[in-house]
Amino acid sequence: MADYQNKNWQEYRDTSAQDTLDRIIKGYFNYANAQFIANISIQDIINILKKHELLIMPTNGQLLSNPYFTPPGPERHNLLINDYDAQTKEFITNDPGTKNG
């Protein structure tokens, strides 16, 4: 992906969620069926998951309290949200940033 960004934009760096969608998801992976949703609510996320769609959620990793992060944790971190447990009111995620997923 870094080579792709260097070739197309003469740089490789952290990008905004919208730029990541445009450059990486749509450009590098050639996946057009994705969208950026600003100011998403918890109910929006639940509704998307009910349609069996996935979400890549950019977060402030330092606010996640993930015990597997080296303190203080990353400022910017992406999670894949793939389900919601209504009983516990928790989102089920896959976290590519740790060996524990």
Image (cartoon, grey):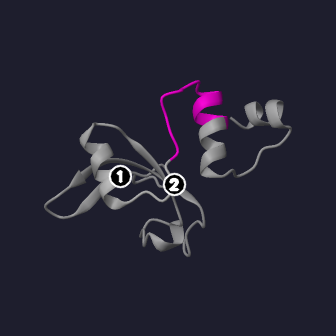
Give coordinates of residue 33: x percent, y percent: 48, 29
Q: Would you identify the image quadrant in which residue 27 lies?
A: top right
Camera-nearest label, 1 or 2: 2
Q: Would you identify the image quadrant in which residue 52 lies?
A: top left
Residue at x-position 50% and y-position 39%: 35
Q: How many marks?
A: 2
Give coordinates of residue 80: x percent, y percent: 42, 47
Q: What residue sits right under mark 2 in the picture?
A: 38
Q: Of 47 and 70, which appears nearest the observer?
A: 47
Mark 1 crowd level (few <14, some 14–19, many ≥20, 10 Å Cα): some
Residue at x-position 41% and y-position 45%: 55
Question: What amino acid is at disc 1?
Answer: Thr
Give coordinates of residue 2: x percent, y percent: 73, 38
Marked residue nearer the N-terminal end (1 or 2): 2
Question: What amino acid is at disc 2?
Answer: Ala
Q: What residue sits right under mark 1 in the picture?
A: 93
The residue lying furthest to the top in this view is: 30
Q: Of 95 and 34, which appears nearest the observer?
A: 34
Residue at x-position 54% and y-position 66%: 60
Q: CA distance from mark 1 to mark 2?
A: 20 Å
Give coordinates of residue 89: x percent, y percent: 21, 64
Asked whether the beta carbons under mark 1 and mark 2 sit within 8 Å of each other, the answer is no
Q: Would you identify the image quadrant in which residue 51 lies?
A: top left
Q: Of 34 and 71, which appears nearest the observer?
A: 34
In the rendered structure, does residue 28 fall within the stretch colored magenta? Answer: yes
Mark 2 crowd level (few <14, some 14–19, many ≥20, 10 Å Cα): few
Quadrant of the snapshot with the N terminus = top right
SS for dot 1 = strand
The residue lying furthest to the left in this view is: 87
Q: Which residues are magenta?
A: 23-36
